[in-house]
Amino acid sequence: MNKRNLHLGFLLTMAMVWLGVNTAQSKEGMWIPTLLEVVEDDMQAMGLKLSAEDIYSINHSSLKDAVVHFNGGCTAEMVSSRGLMLTNQQCGYDQIQQQSSVDNDLLTHGFWAMNLSEELANPGVTATFIDRIEDVTRRLSRVCVGLSGEEREKRMKEEMALIVKEATEGTGLDGRVVTFDFGNMHCLITTRVFKDVRLVGAPPSAVGKFGGDADNWVWPRHTGDFSVFRIYADLQNNPAEYSDDNVPYRPAHHFPVSLDGVQEGDFTMVFGFPGRTEQYLTSDAVEHVITRLNPMRIAMRDEALAVINSARATSDELRIAYASKQSSVANAWKKWKGQNRGLTELHALDVKRNLEARLTLTSGTTVIDDIAAVNATYFPYLEARSLFIEWVYYGPDLLNYAHGFQGLIEGVEGEEREALLTRLRGEEAGFWKNCDPLVDKDLMARLVTGYLKWMPEALVPQGLEEEVSKAGGGVEWAESLYDKSVFDNPETMAKLLANDNPKSWAKLEKDPMYQLVEKLRSHYFTEIAPQYGQLRQEIDGLSAAYTRSLRETFPEEVFPVDANSTLRLTYGKVEGSAPYDGMQYNALSTSRGILQKYIPGDPDFDMPARLVELLETRQHGQYADESGDLVVCFTGSNHTTGGNSGSPALNGMGHLVGINFDRSWESTMSDILFDPSRCRNIMVDIRYVLWVIDVYAGAGHLVDEMTLVNSSSKSGLE
Ligand code: ASP
């Protein structure tokens, strides 16, 4: 087969695989929007009333024009012609926290802008729209014919740069070529990035985070996990930096909002930016996740959470300061626990081993053994990388803070210096608002101990172990570190920044905090990251062969492409589940459950009196279902992952019925092994969102801005 036919063959195989979805019970898969035609029939048979072209088109406005990549990590959706946008509360959490103080605690009480002038700016936050996705695999293969190794890499990069330049020059668009399926496919993705994104509304934590960590990753759920933002543009409707002159953005499409609600069995689709799945981990890698990687990451976060949770319980200042950090640390910590349990319960190792044995036997490939051979060298680097991330990025904040001064300490000059100084001065107040030196010191003590315990011996930075044991242990070592460093002293740092004396900066080179972070970083970037990167590349190359081989050998089976933070559509049904014997989950939860869970005074289950009263007196308004109940959340068999947080959940007409925000406890392993019988995504019912905005918060002007529809409305594209 020549290259062209091979690529067509690949697409065809994928198409056949996806058509195979018709017969398989599974809705596994996160479909690339340009290739939706292959599942169009299946979706329509399940209840979709639109065409693939209505969902994704470059010729006219389509559903994709209302889907936003929110700040690079979450999804959001447009719900008005004036730039109004919904996402999860967890996605806007940083911004809400940044705007909060003890006297003006938006996290606890919520926030509602009653007109445009009250909307709050969020410097640095981005809202990205997809302009176009184009498969450029063939073009890249063509220019690389006959090349290999570094030469091929180089040629590939040049061509990618050229592709991006051709597509974006003079257009105001951003662009990049993205690798799919370990390199079996490449797509050019052009985007429009908006930078003036203002906070419009956030429910109180008692709604947006109702149930807290206890209910996170759990069904039945009663959380109103949403927040409201607005995108602003310049007078020509183009992206612009924040300015008072900017006006609300007019999107090419916004989702009509359905008041009909959903029933068990209804078609749903979730359109968003799923972050990362690892469905082609081989059995040895899954075993490594279960026995080493997850236990070490969980243990590091156990330590961090012990410090953060007890600090937060001592004062309102610390509760607010560490709210966002607590959420991000606890979220993956709980997921990894569920993941290990799920992988074990599903006998993931047997499932993987069986598939690998079948493939090896049928096709004669050696790819599984080849991957295992590289993995044996790779695992220690993977562990070292994870531990670096846990300590330096999720641990004490002073490490990265100290590193931020590197340019000044090294004496950069000119414009670069001015820009750095301005940035550091600007960030100072925000940093100390969220960092308490004593809490930071406790984090340091606990995490250095965890790091040394779990780190593969040969990869520990030289001298660290001796240093800590000489000090008498992690606690004593951290004590002396913070004693000698000036980075934990806000007043000293403020003075240094105000005086900007090159000699004082130069002296900080000897500061133990600075020395520590630079040592850890240089060790990581010279001893770990390059080897990790190279081995990862080898594994990706082999994994590309693995997935190709799976599709060629078993053309009748489903082998979807892993998520990679690009726009995907996933579809399924509103469905409950029965994950364990004798247990049956309904698909819908109602406000009755909120009242059942209500525990006055409990940090996770308390509620403001007004909310309790409105729910107890069943003041559900036009948002009630036909029996008068207020539906709060629902589950579906849509295959989602992190990054899908905030994604629009749409009915067959393309109307917004909910906002995706989580998966059930029994689904947490779905990034590695998807099980259609028990994997369920969790969405907040859009009628509950509207109820909170309108009835609870009295911000009905926001609902008035939306296009509300019910079953008599015809299309999702008005
Ligand atoms: N709430 C989840 C998260 O935090 C969303 C998901 O993974 O399904 O990533």
Image: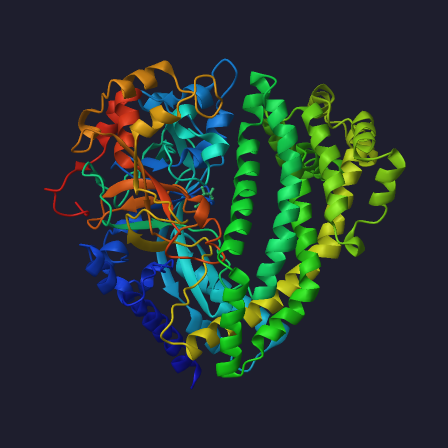
Quarter location, residue 539: bottom right
- Taking the image as shown, residue 50 lies to the left or right of residue 174, namely left
Q: Is residue 73 above or below residue 321?
A: below
Image location (x, y in percent) of residue 177:
46, 61
**Which of the two residues, 673 or 651, is positioned nearer the viewer here?**
673
Image location (x, y in percent) of residue 291:
64, 54
- Taking the image as shown, residue 128 lies to the left or right of residue 352, namely left
Q: Is residue 314 above or below residue 283?
A: above
- Taking the image as shown, residue 641 lies to the left or right of residue 652, namely right
> How has the structure been colored for display?
rainbow
| Residue at the image position 55 percent from the left and 47 percent from the top | 336
Q: Quadrant of the C terminus?
A: top left
Image location (x, y in percent) of residue 451:
73, 44
| Residue at the image position 70 percent from the left and 52 percent from the top | 384
| Residue at the image position 79 percent from the left and 50 percent from the top | 460
| Farthest right residue in view | 470
Q: Is residue 241 visible?
A: no
- Taking the image as shown, residue 153 lies to the left or right of residue 277, namely right
Q: Is residue 666 above or below residue 438?
A: below
Quarter location, residue 662: top left
Quadrant of ligand 1 in image? top left
Q: Quadrant of the N terminus?
A: bottom left
Image location (x, y in percent) of residue 423:
60, 32
Q: Is residue 148 visible?
A: yes
| Farthest bottom residue in view | 1
**Which of the two residues, 521 or 611, is positioned nearer the viewer here?**
611
Q: Is residue 121 above or below residue 182?
A: above
Quarter location, residue 189: bottom left
| Residue at the image position 37 percent from the left and 70 percent from the top | 14
